[in-house]
């Protein structure tokens, strides 16, 4: 079984750990918060944790490393993935993407040090770098794998064509593609039904990416899966209010939470989508328990009902 298979049905995204992004350091309060969130995830059947070297400007990985240090044996019970490739603006330098091989190696070593682990289960390339040479990228990934620092590799925010170009130079399989996918960010599903309509040009999702991932056994991970609470907390548009009412009604009838309904909508798709939840609230993590431990209990008609409510207009 691969690290991605072991990740399970829901992944916890650690972007909200470590305190404010504009703070230079973290303290006891941030570590205790991370402990509470990690425990809430474990209590909810979530054993996979998603990081990136930029989250909290490194503090998210660092407080997670503190949690691991305080919990002997925890590392062996979970899967840990991180991402690299985004360089934040700093010291007069503009923010940019950097997937040069040497940079990948340096960023991974820094992440391992912050996480206090010898290896990550999966390394994802965070964003496409137009200046990246696939051969250079592949060589860096292969070296990290050979050194035992990275057990599997994947990508994030990449199209089928970009995955194909990388895979052509890489002996290791690309095992995951993490994309923004939710009941609100629906371009991934809209693209498939707007073929042969004028609206197809406005979708903004790369044609064939879902099909490529399904055909090649690449796990689709959905970041932003809870849609930033649009259907479970705050609503701003008529469509969001209508969808939230439908979500609440389904949750009540099925004996679960609105968060679970929103995640079930993703998991019900046959592509085997694995939601990544990024809430920093332990109570809201626990509200996702049924999404992590139960199969989606949505009928064909209920799934479409949620989609139509969220899009606010009929299908073509």
Image (cartoon, rainbow, N blue to C red):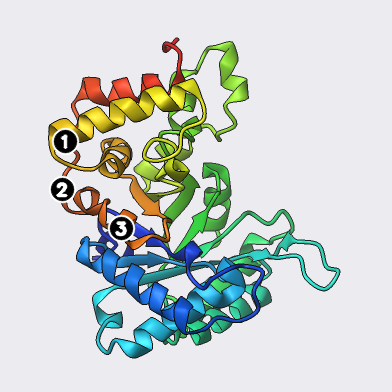
Question: Counting other residues with Cα less than 10 Å from the Cα at mark 2, is it few (<14), some (14-19), or many (20 or more)?
Answer: few
Q: What kind of element bears circle 3?
A: helix
Q: Which residue lies furthest to the right in this view?
A: 92
Left or right: 90, with 266 as reference point: right
**At 68% from the left edge and 61% from the top edge, which residue is drawn?**
133
Left or right: 261, with 151 as reference point: left
Residue identified by numbered label 3: 283
The x and y percentages for residue 143 are 53, 79
Foreground residue among 172 and 53: 53
**At 58% from the left edge and 69% from the top edge, which residue is drawn?**
56
The x and y percentages for residue 90 are 78, 70
Which disc, if any, is residue 294? Answer: 2
Q: Which of the 4 image quarters holds residue 95?
A: bottom right
**Whether residue 210 is situated above or below residue 85 in the rendered picture:** above
**Whether residue 15 is situated above or below residue 29 in the rendered picture:** above
The x and y percentages for residue 47 are 27, 67
Q: What kind of element bears circle 1?
A: loop
Which disc, if any, is residue 297? Answer: 1
Q: In which quarter of the image is the C terminus?
A: top left
Tell me the mark number nearer the camera, choosing from 3 and 1: 3
Left or right: 157, with 70 as reference point: right
Residue 2 in sight in this render: no
Question: Counting other residues with Cα less than 10 Å from the Cα at mark 3, is it few (<14), some (14-19), or many (20 or more)?
Answer: few
Foreground residue among 259 and 165: 259
Of callouts 3 and 1, the N-terminal one? 3
In space, the residues marked 3 and 1 are separated at their CA atoms by 22 Å
In space, the residues marked 1 and 2 are separated at their CA atoms by 8 Å
């Amino acid at each position: 079984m691969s690290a991605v298979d072991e990740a399970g049905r829901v992944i916890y995204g650690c972007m909200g750990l470590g305190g404010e992004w504009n703070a230079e350091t973290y303290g006891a309060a941030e570590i205790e918060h991370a402990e509470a969130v990690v425990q809430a995830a474990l209590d909810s059947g979530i054993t996979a944790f998603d990081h990136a070297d930029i989250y909290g400007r490194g503090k998210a990985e660092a407080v997670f490393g503190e949690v691991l240090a305080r919990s002997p044996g925890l590392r062996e019970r979970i899967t840990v993935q991180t991402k690299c490739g985004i360089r934040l603006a700093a010291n007069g330098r503009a923010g940019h993407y950097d997937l040069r091989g040497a940079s990948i190696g340096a960023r991974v070593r820094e992440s391992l040090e912050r996480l206090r682990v010898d290896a990550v289960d999966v390394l994802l390339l965070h964003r496409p770098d137009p200046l990246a040479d696939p051969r250079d990228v592949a060589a860096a990934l292969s070296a990290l794998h050979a050194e035992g620092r990275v057990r599997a590799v994947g990508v994030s925010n990449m199209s089928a064509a970009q995955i194909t170009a990388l895979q052509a130079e890489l002996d290791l399989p690309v095992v995951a593609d993490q994309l923004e996918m939710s009941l609100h960010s629906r371009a991934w599903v809209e693209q498939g039904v707007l073929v042969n309509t004028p609206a197809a040009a406005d979708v903004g999702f790369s044609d064939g990416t879902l099909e490529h991932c399904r055909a090649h056994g690449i796990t689709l991970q959905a970041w932003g899966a809870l849609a930033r609470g649009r259907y479970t907390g705050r609503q701003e548009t008529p469509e969001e209010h209508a969808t939230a009412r439908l979500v609440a009604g389904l949750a009540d009838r099925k004996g679960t939470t609105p968060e679970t309904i929103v995640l079930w909508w993703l998991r019900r798709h046959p592509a085997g989508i694995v939601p990544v939840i990024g809430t920093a609230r332990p109570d809201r993590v626990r509200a996702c328990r049924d999404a992590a431990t139960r199969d989606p209990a949505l009928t064909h008609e209920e799934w479409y009902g949620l989609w139509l409510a969220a899009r606010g207009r009929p299908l073509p």
